[in-house]
Structures are given as structure tokens and as C-alpha cells.
Image: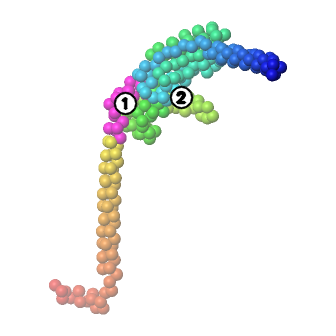
Amino acid sequence: MKTAAKQRGPLRNILSGIAAAIAKNAGRASEQGTGTASMVAEWPLPPSATLGSSMRLKGIEREVRARLPWTVRKFAKAETGRIVLRMVQTDADAFRAASATIARTLEGIEALAVLPREAEDILTISSRERHKWLRDGRLKSIGTRTVKMRGRSNAVTFHVFDPRHIEDVLDRDLATAWREEDAKEASENRRRAAGKAALTRAGKRSGNARKTRNSGSDDAPKLEGWDTFEAEGLLR
């Protein structure tokens, strides 16, 4: 029994050493993982900048990344209500330079032009409605932008909008009012078209009836001797 206890003692010590080594290595890995993103800077985004749209938030992220070097862009991310920059400690110089660039980019970010898809997401409207309201002047464009899309040979030109105009449309719920106006106009147009079609059909029926009467009188056979009878004026 004592021999068995002596054998279990060294075995227990060996297992304890292995467990301690595993824990120590895990702690080092955790520290290294934390070190890969140990430098963090963030900038708040006001609601007037995002207008409550996740698509608008991604658009701001693209705008910020476009001002940064290629090697740094992936470290800048848009999160709910903020822009966050996370980089490793060994890139301290690049971190400071990127932080300064982001801070300058976000100055007046509320005035960044609203893209078409962003406007649709903010206002909860369809592409068809956006095109229609843009044509009739209810949605006001502040100009156009031309970009070369990835995977396309030709550049794409589209209208952009003033964020304050889009915010006004949103706050006053004008999209709902415009949608109701369009529905009434479409109903009135259908009623007029139906009335016009009915008049057209009635005109065709009347024309066909006149043709039938005229053709009937022209094609009627004449009685023999009728010309002489009429010339003598017996019907006068």
C-alpha cells in the first residue's frame, strides 16, 4: 500500500506540472491576443450624421477608410454610434497618423452627401419611388457623382442629396404623404382611362351602326320602272 502511495505521489506532481504549464501558456496567448488590438481610439457619431440608418453608417465608414492608407483601412470600423480604430502597439506611428486623419474626416460629417441607397434606407422608400420623386422635384438633388464600380467596365453616375433635406422629409413623414398622393393620382388616371375607353368603344359601335344602315340603303335592289315613275312626279 505504501509503495502504491509513493508511486501515485510523483505521478500527481507530474500532472500538476503539466496543468500549470498549460495554464501559463494559455495566459501568454491571451496576453498576446489582447496585444494585437491594444491601441484603441473611437469617435462618436451623432444621430444627425447617421440619420438612424445602418447603410448610412457603412457609407461613413467607406468615407473614412478612403482617406486612410491601404494598410490601415481595415483597422477602422463603423459600429453603432461611433467609428473605432484598433491597431497593435508596434504600429504606434501609423495609429497616431490614422487617428488624426479620422478626426479631420469626421469634422462636419453631418454634411456628407446622402447616396441613393442611403436615402432609400433612411426614408424606407423603393427605388421606383425615389426615381419618380426625383423627376417631379419632390426629392431635391444637390448634384451628381460618378464612380467606377468594381466589376463594371463603365462608370456609374447618380444623384446625391443634402442630408438636411432628407432629414426634413423624414421628420415630416413626407414620404407617406407623397405615396398617398401618388395612389390618388393613379386611381384618377385609371378612372379617366376607363372613361376614355368607354367613349371610344361607344363611338366605334355608333360608326358601325351608321355604316350598316348606309350599306343597307345603297345595296337595296331597285324596282323595275321606278326611274320612270319618279320622273313623272307621281309622288309629288
| Residue at the far front in the pictured view | 1
Residue 71 is a magenta residue: no
Position of 132 compared to 187: left or right? right
Q: Which residue is mark 1?
A: 170
Relative to 215, say whether 38 is above or below.
Answer: above
Q: In the image, which residues are magenta?
A: 160-179
Q: Main secondary structure of the magenta part?
A: helix
Residue 142: x %, y % from top left: 42, 26
Q: Which residue is mark 2?
A: 146
Which image quarter is the N terminus in? top right
Can you see residue 82?
Answer: yes
Can you see residue 18?
Answer: no
| Residue at the far right in the pictured view | 3
For this rendering, which residue is in front, 225 or 33? 33
For this rendering, which residue is in front, 154 or 220? 154
**Callout 2 amino acid:** Thr
**Callout 1 amino acid:** Leu
Colouring scheme, one of rainbow, by chain, secondary structure, one colour: rainbow
Which image quarter is the C terminus in? bottom left
For this rendering, which residue is in front, 198 or 150? 150
Relative to 135, say whether 207 is above or below.
Answer: below
